[in-house]
Image (cartoon, helix red, strand yellow):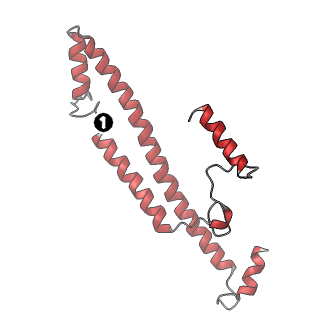
């Protein structure tokens, strides 16, 4: 968006009697933009599914994207590393470039793997923590006879 276009949009908004511009937001009366019904609801199954997907992505990436270790020999050098070393030993500059590419790729792959592991671990932890919280809350709001408390009693916990 050019400066002139921005200035024209501001002028148009001022002509409509708007004293304040709203960006990236819905009006509150339309049910969006943080109204009273905008609670975040997460089910245990949702957390488990996302955590499982992150773990699956981790495993698939670990095995499939490891170009440095693909076809690795007993000495731990992969076919890509061997190709880089062979090209370099014969004086080809491509060997050094391939070696650099493998190093950068491996570094980036480790970063993505670490992020996937972090997501998976965090969601597993969150799922367990929320289950423990639910159990504690359930124990607190039971009546002395083990039955559910009436709503009038429960509402006291939120005042």
Q: Residue at x 48, y 53 (%)?
A: 121
Q: Quadrant of the C terminus?
A: bottom right
Q: For mark 1, what is the residue? A: 66
Taking the view exactly as shown, the residue that stands out farthest to the front is 15
Horizontal side of residue 126 vs 64, given as left or right: right
Residue 154: x %, y % from top left: 72, 82
For the residue pair 158 and 135, the one nearer the viewer reads as 158
Q: Please state, as top left, top right, bottom left or bottom right, where the N terminus lies in the image.
A: top right
Residue found at x 24% / y 29%: 78
Label 1 element class: loop
Spot occupied by residue 115 in the image (x, y as percentages of width and height): 47, 44
For the image, the number of numbered tags is: 1
Residue 114 shown left or right of residue 81 in the figure: right
- On screen, residue 26 above or below 139: above
Q: Quadrant of residue 8?
A: top right
Who is closer to the viewer here, 152 or 130? 152
Q: Is residue 109 above or below residue 28?
A: above
Neighbour tally class for label 1: few under 14, some 14-19, many 20 plus, Cα within 10 Å: some
Q: Can you name the residue that lies furthest to the bottom here?
A: 145
Q: Foreground residue, 74 or 106? A: 106
Q: Residue at x 31, y 47 (%)?
A: 60
């Amino acid at each position: 968006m050019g400066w002139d276009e921005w200035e024209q949009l501001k002028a148009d908004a001022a002509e409509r009697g708007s004293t304040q511009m709203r960006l990236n937001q819905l009006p509150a009366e339309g049910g969006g933009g943080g109204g009273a019904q905008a609670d975040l609801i997460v089910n245990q199954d949702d957390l488990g599914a996302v955590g499982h997907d992150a773990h699956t992505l981790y495993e698939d990436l670990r095995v499939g994207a490891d170009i440095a270790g693909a076809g690795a020999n007993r000495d731990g050098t992969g076919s890509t590393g061997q190709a880089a070393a062979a090209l370099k030993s014969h004086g080809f500059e491509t060997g050094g470039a391939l070696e650099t590419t493998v190093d950068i790729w491996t570094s980036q792959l480790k970063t993505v793997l670490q992020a996937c592991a972090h997501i998976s671990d965090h969601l597993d932890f969150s799922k367990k923590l929320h289950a423990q919280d639910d159990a504690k809350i359930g124990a607190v709001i039971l009546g002395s006879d083990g039955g559910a408390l009436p709503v009038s009693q429960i509402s006291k916990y939120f005042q």
